[in-house]
Image (spheres, rainbow, N blue to C red):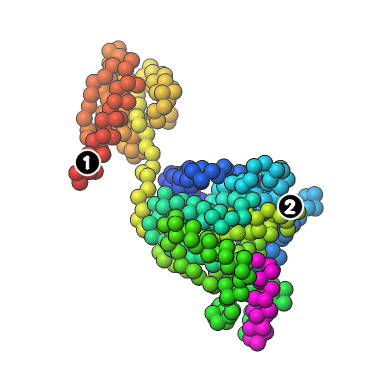
Amino acid sequence: MAEINRAVKGTNDILPSFVHKWQFVESSMLDTARLFGFSEIRVPVFEHTEVFKRSVGDTTDVVQKEMYTFDDKGGRSITLRPELTAGVIRSVLENGLTNGPLPLKVCYIGGCYRYEKPQAGRLREFHQFGVECVGAAAPNADAEVISLAKQVLTNIGIEKISLEINSIGCPECRKKYQEALKDYFRKNIDTLCATCRDRLERNPMRILDCKSPVCKELCENAPVVIDYLCDECEEHFNEVKKHLDWAGITYTVNPHIVRGLDYYTRTVFEFVSGDIGAQSTVCGGGRYDGLIAQMGGQPTPSLGFAMGIERLMMVLEAQNADMPEAPTCDLYIASMGDNASLKATALCNSLREDGFSVQTDICAKGLKAQMKFANKIGAKFTLVLGEDELNNNTAKLKNMQSGEETEIALSELSEELLSALNKSALKNLTDSIFN
Ligand code: ATP
Ligand code: MG
């Protein structure tokens, strides 16, 4: 088949019959973030490649294997964003946002691009919702950001989800740990995959996030960073846990979480679902106290998280969560003859100005075909305009669900439609209560 008829491997279309679910999830996410004081930020889909190398880290899987990088016609190296934190922090610094009141709280929704092996829950174009809280060092910031993630998951309808947290310490306390880790892996160097052998001296913690089965098995008995925390990092982690307890959020400490991006320090966390198979992490996040300085700003302790919207959709589907129905047309106006068609144009326009969703025939169909179409699109009410209706200025408003017809004055159509829609909505509600 010609390529012209096929989407690129690992990309998905979000079709009109499904998009209302995305709209619901996205608006619920932004609304929830607003309750915690987060405002939306929108940044470009591509950045200078250096932005990601510097922040995500050039020994990570993302930078080593997964980026869509190309030279533009001006010879600049450009990369499609594999995640949004790097671009958001670049924008925060470039626009001097850290000079305003801190903490700065921003959130985002956007497409991300990673050259990965496509499978269930793993795409080459996927979407993330995420937040960044810039300039907040205290442990209750960690708990607040985790609470926000949890609240978002609850508000979109996810009931069953587990939270795993860990602390990966600061660069200072990590020195000892890295030595212990190197010792451990050096003993097993022949078992490591080629990429990890290269990582061993440069950034041994990356091995802990390797997906290759042999490395994974070796990691099971590797020393864990939580045993090497300095006093300050340990105290910070204890305080985070206390605040989570007070927020009523249950979690387990999983000493094996290290996260796949280099910029994390201290608290890291994941929300994991048991309902969607192997790609089970729907949200990952943590503190990145060193990132802003690493990207050229003043040292500014910060933290955030990102969730994969496609994986969340899979969880909602698997848990059979309540989702809003696709919105349907309030009224379909069928017409017979040129005069009726003109009247339909006038009525449609004024009803749409009043906020109703209204359609009429724009394909010169016969009456029967028009009614068939109204049925197919699930119009709640229909109205047929012919010569008689035009002469009398009245028509029958038909409730398509009950079949009930009411004679109404065309001049009162807006008021009549409003009351008919309210009545049928009320009826649907009582029906669903009693059934
Ligand atoms: P994984 O371990 O699954 O590769 P990751 O550590 O690479 O995830 P992050 O970079 O932390 O993931 O991204 C945050 C979230 O974005 C993930 O928890 C996941 O829900 C989602 N995500 C990451 N990569 C993909 C992908 N290729 N396809 C779909 N969703 C993804
Ligand atoms: Mg990954």
- Kindly indicate the quadrant of the structure image that contains residue 378: top left
Residue visible at 65% across and 55% down in the picture: 301
Mark 1 or 2 closer to N-term? Answer: 2
Residue visible at 48% across and 54% down in the picture: 147
Count numbered badges in the picture: 2
Helix, strand or loop status at disc 2 = loop
Magenta region, main secondary structure: helix
The circle on residue 431 is 1
Which amino acid type is marked by label 2? Answer: Gln
Residue 310 horizontal side relative to residue 106, left or right: left
Q: Which residue is mark 2?
A: 298
Q: Is mark 1 within 8 Å of ligand 1?
A: no
Whether residue 177 is in magenta: the answer is yes
Q: Where does the magenta region start and end?
A: 170-188
- Kindly indicate the quadrant of the structure image that contains residue 376: top left
In the picture shown, does residue 241 fall above or below 19?
Answer: below
